[in-house]
Image (cartoon, grey):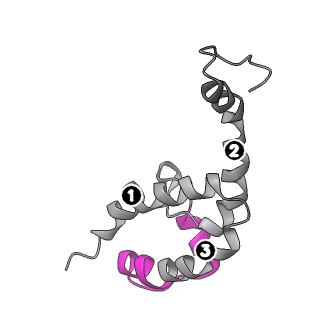
Amino acid sequence: MYPRAPYPSFTFGLKHRWTYYLSLLLDIGNLLDSPERAMSHSLIPALIGHICATAKRDLLALPVRIGGLEITNPCHIAASEYEASAISEPLVDEIAAHTHKIPDDHAM
């Protein structure tokens, strides 16, 4: 078995699926404790060779360009992902109304 094979599966697949759900569902962060524990006790030890402490787990959530592995904690990013999705609301309204015009910049 290749211990690093799950890493691309997470970063290119599962992570983006979670981000999609986090942007749609309000207050879902507390429901993601179980998947976070599974990542912390299975995925991360498979990659680095041991279970890491909370501080090191936070370092692994950092982007790759600054030394992390970009294994984000879905519990920590749930609220910010939901808030960030609100920026597209005026565009969604225009699409649903079939008006074929771009919303004003101040609406976005």
Horizontal side of residue 93 vs 8, given as left or right:
right
Quickly name the residue at label 3: 32
Query: Dot 1: within a 10 Å radius of its alpha carbon, few (fewer than 14), some, or many (20 or more) residues?
Result: few
In the image shown, does 51 or 84 lie closer to the viewer?
84
Residue 47 quadrant: bottom left
Secondary structure at badge 1 equals helix
Residue closest to the eye, 48 or 74: 74
Considering the whole magenta stretch, tell me its main secondary structure. Answer: helix
| Up/down of 90 relative to 26, above or below | above
As drawn, the residue found furthest toward the front would be: 97
Give residue 13's mark.
1
Residue 21 point in image, percent of width and height: 57, 58
Residue wearing tag 2: 84
Where is residue 108 shown, x and y percent of the image? 74, 27
Direction from residue 43 to residue 72 in the image, left or right: right
- N-term-proximal mark, 1 vs 3: 1
In the displayed image of the protein, which residue is found farthest to the left? 1
Provide residue 4's location: percent of width, then percent of height. 29, 70
Query: Could you tell me which secondary element the residue under label 3 belongs to?
Result: helix
Packing grade of label 3 (10 A; few <14, some 14-19, many >=20) is some
Q: What residue range appears in magenta?
A: 41-61
Q: Residue 17: percent from the left, percent from the top?
A: 47, 57
72 vs 44, left or right, is: right
Amino acid on which the number 1 mark rests in the picture? Gly
Direction top: furthest residue: 101
N-term-proximal mark, 2 vs 3: 3
As shown in the figure, which amino acid type bears the numbered disc 3?
Leu
Q: What residue sits 70% from the left and 74% below the top?
A: 30
Classify the position of the N terminus by image quarter.
bottom left
